Amino acid sequence: MKALIALEDGRIFEGRSFTGPGEVSGEIVFNTSMTGYQEILTDPSYKGQMVTMTYPLIGNYGVNPEDEESLGIHLGAFIVREYEADYSNWRATGDLASYLKKHGILGIEQVDTRAITRHIRLSGAMKAVISTIDLDERSLVKKAKESLGLVGLDLASKVGCKRPYCWEEGKILELDDISPERLSRLKSWESSRFRIAIIDCGLKFNQLRLFSKRACQCVVFPASTMPEQILSIDPHGIFISNGPGDPAAVTGVIEIVKALLGKRPIFGICLGHQILSLALGAKTYKLKFGHRGGNQPVKDLSTGRIEITAQNHGFAVDEATLPAGVEVTHINLNDNTVEGIRHRDIPAFSVQYHPENAPGPHDSEYLFDRFVDLMEEFHSK
């Protein structure tokens, strides 16, 4: 089934749908990961975007429930050079095409993904429309220009949880009563050292797995939860998750984090990093084509160590706007953008990349240990 990809600047790419008919708009971006396509599909940070994979062969190892990073697929369309229907992997429970169809997501193949990637790198990420229904190029370009894009959009509220829940033995346990007394009776508290309140802007399950691995009970709150309700569970620390959209538009969460500063140790990842920076008084800006993939080099300025990191963001923190008392802790070695900050006086730090390694390398997992150490230090005073 023929498909057209129309960019807002008038560029047209042809392909074919391997998931049936459809039409969708969004920001078109690329990801350089060679594996981990299911983790990418289920990453809520891709809400409002259509992802082009630079690796040419996708689908060869199928899909399985264990590799899901959320309860659904959040991107608008998935674009690949060649889709492989005959998967081979002992963990697989199904094929990629059926998985996309189940969630109503367009899958497009036989596309010149190298040309798309090069065009985005030169011209920047931009709005686009993909359609198998409307094959009129002028019509599609007009639709792309008129689509919303990402700037100014608060998408975190659309992908996060609607009710508080506890991560209990690898599963979601929704709770009507989230008092400390109720939480202390759960199995997750029996072997826990710390209780973490998580502000869900579009988190990935592996963040919860890694906290649980470090004996932390995770209580997840909707992004709109008021500070007093978050503090009502008497958490040892507060975590701000990753998520989609323009960080400056997530004004409600920024105000919530402002109210929580200094009351408990805070750790933020990706959108959480940007929200923490904005709450501290900094500003953010849109990158030309963003950082998306599993091979971004980052330098830890405190140790001099170089980490290979997984990343997925289209906005960055403006270093020149960081207030006094806030220092840069990590930088991206490709373009020197800010990849991590910490406050010298307030127990709060964050990183722009994804240390939960799903998909991606394990180099940065130490940051979860760093947060545990910060909570221990804070509560030992």
Image: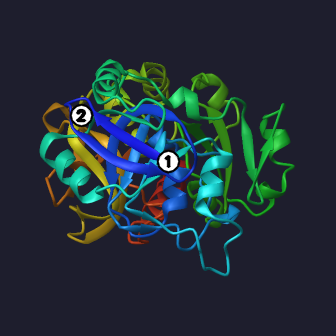
Q: CA distance from mark 1 to mark 2?
A: 35 Å
What is the count of numbered marks? Answer: 2
In the rendered structure, which amino acid carries the disc numbered 1?
Answer: Met
Q: Position of residue 298 (x, y in %)?
A: 25, 62
User: As displayed, is residue 318 above or below residue 218?
Assistant: above
Disc sitting over residue 1 in the figure: 1
Front-lying residue, 236 or 96: 96
Mark 2, secondary structure of its residue: strand
55 displayed left or right of 231: left
Q: Disc 1 vs disc 2: which is toward the camera? A: 1
User: As displayed, is residue 227 above or below residue 344?
Assistant: above
Front-lying residue, 19 or 323: 19
Disc sitting over residue 310 in the figure: none
Q: Position of residue 179 (x, y in %)?
A: 79, 34
Q: Residues within 10 Å of mark 1 (few under 14, many from 20)?
A: few
The mark nearer the N terminus, 1 or 2, is 1
Q: Position of residue 146 (x, y in %)?
A: 33, 18
Q: How is the image coloured?
A: rainbow
Residue labelled with disc 2: 286
Residue at x 57%, y 68% (from the top left corner): 85
Residue at x 37%, y 21% (from the top left corner): 148
Q: Circles 1 and 2: CB distance less than 8 Å?
A: no
Res 341 visible = yes
Residue at x 63%, y 48% (from the top left corner): 101
Q: Quadrant of residue 163?
A: top right
User: As displayed, is residue 327 above or below residue 99?
Assistant: above
Q: Residues within 10 Å of mark 2 (few under 14, many from 20)?
A: some
Q: Position of residue 66 (x, y in %)?
A: 67, 65
Res 372 visible = no
Mark 1, secondary structure of its residue: loop
